[in-house]
Image (tube, rainbow, N blue to C red):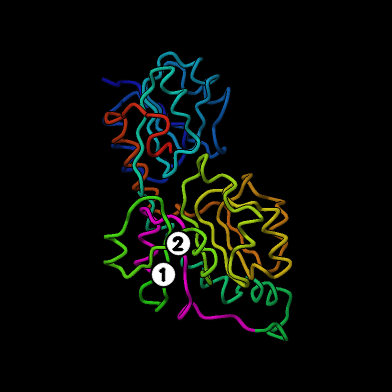
Amino acid sequence: MIRRVAVPLSYFEFFPEIKADLTSRYPDVRFQTEHTGLMQGDKLVEFLKGYEAAVIGLSRFTDEVCAQLPDLRVVSLCSAGVDHIDPAVLNKYDIKMWWAPGINKVSVSELAVCYMVFALRRLHLFSSTLRRGEWRGPMGFGANLQGRTVGIHGCGHIGKEVVKLLKPFGVRILACDKVDYSHFYREWDVEEVDAEELWARSDVLTIHLSRNKGTIGMYSGAVLDKMKPGAVLINCARGNIVDEEALAERLMSGHIAAAAFDVFAVEPANGNPLLNLPNFFGSPHIGATTMESWGAMLRSGVEGVENAFRPEPGVYPFD
C-alpha cells in the first residue's frame, strides 16, 4: 500500500477540496505550492526523494531521474497525453503509472471549434487592426463555417466531441483514423476517408492525433502541399506533428489560408516565427486550461495512485 505521496504540480492550490481529499488519504503528502513552472531533472529528484508515488503533470521521468528515486513505485498522470512518459524506463525501474484518456475532451474540442470560426473569420487580423487604431478598411472578407467541409484527423475521444459540436453548424464532416469507428460515423453522419482524401477535400482540417513515432513530422511540406488550396489548419493536439517551417512558407504563399495552433514543437513558443504571420493565431497550450478539465484531471491523478498499472511499450497509449 502506498503511504508517501508527493505532488510536483502546483495546480492543487487552485482546488482546495481536491487537495484536502488527497491529504485525507495520504496525510504526509508533499505539495509543490509555488507556481515556478514545470519541475524537471535535479529539482524533480530532490522533491521526490523518499516518496513512493508522484502525482504529476508533464514532468519527465528519464532514466537518470528514475535511477535516483529507488523508493518510487507509482507515477500518476493528471495530463491527458502521455508523450512525455517512456514506458520502457518505468518498467526498467518497476514503476507503475496511471493515465485516463479523454479526460479533457470537452475543453479541447470546444477550443478547436472556436479556432475554426476564429480563423475563417480572420478575427486575429481584424483585432490587431483595431488595436492599431484602424477601423475596417480594405481588409477583405472572412468566411462562414456553415457549408464547409471539415476534416478531422484522429477521431478518438476529442475528435468525437468535435463531431458533436459541429453538427449544428451544417457542415460536411470527414474523418480519418486508424481505429475502426464506423458505428460512430454512421450514427453521426460522418464520412470515413483515408488521409489522402482528407487532405484533398477539407476546407478546414483539425488535428486530434497523439504524438508518437507514427505522427511526429506527419504534416511535412509534402503533405501540406496535398491539402486543398485555401484550407484552414487547426492543431490543438501536440507539437511536432506539423513541420512549422513548412507551414510558415505555405501560409505566406496563401496555399494554406490560415492556421490556428495551441501547441508547438518547442514550448514555450515565445519568439516562434509563426506568431508574426497575420494569418496565424497561436495560444500557449491552453486546450485543457479550464476549471472543469483541470478539476477532472486532478481527481483522476488522485484516484490513480492506488489504480496504477504496468505500461507496455508499443501498446496503447504508447503506439
Residue of label 2? 152
Where does the image place residue 68, in percent across and percent down from the top left? 51, 15
State the residue in front, 27 or 134: 134
**Element type at mark 2:** strand
Residue shown at the point (68%, 77%) measured from the top left: 130
What amino acid does circle 2 point to? Ile
State the residue in front, 120 or 188: 188
Where does the image place residue 305, in percent across and percent down from the top left? 31, 30
Q: In the displayed structure, does residue 234 sit left or right of residue 252?
A: left
Q: Is residue 164 magenta?
A: yes
Q: Residue furthest bottom?
A: 137
Residue shown at the point (40%, 77%) measured from the top left: 169
Residue of label 1? 173
State the residue in front, 196 or 99: 196
Q: In the displayed structure, does residue 274 sit left or right of residue 60?
A: right
Spatial separation of the CA atoms under disc 1 and disc 2? 7 Å
* The disc label shown at residue 189, or none: none
Q: Is residue 303 magenta?
A: no
| Crowd tier of the residue under label 1, counting other residues whose Cα lies within 10 Å: few below 14, some 14–19, many 20 or above | many
Q: What's the magenta region?
A: 141-165
Where does the image place residue 32, in percent across and percent down from the top left? 47, 32
Q: Are marks 1 and 2 in contact (CB under 8 Å)?
A: yes
What amino acid does circle 1 point to? Ile
Where does the image place residue 96, in percent across and percent down from the top left? 36, 25
Q: Quadrant of the N terminus?
A: top left
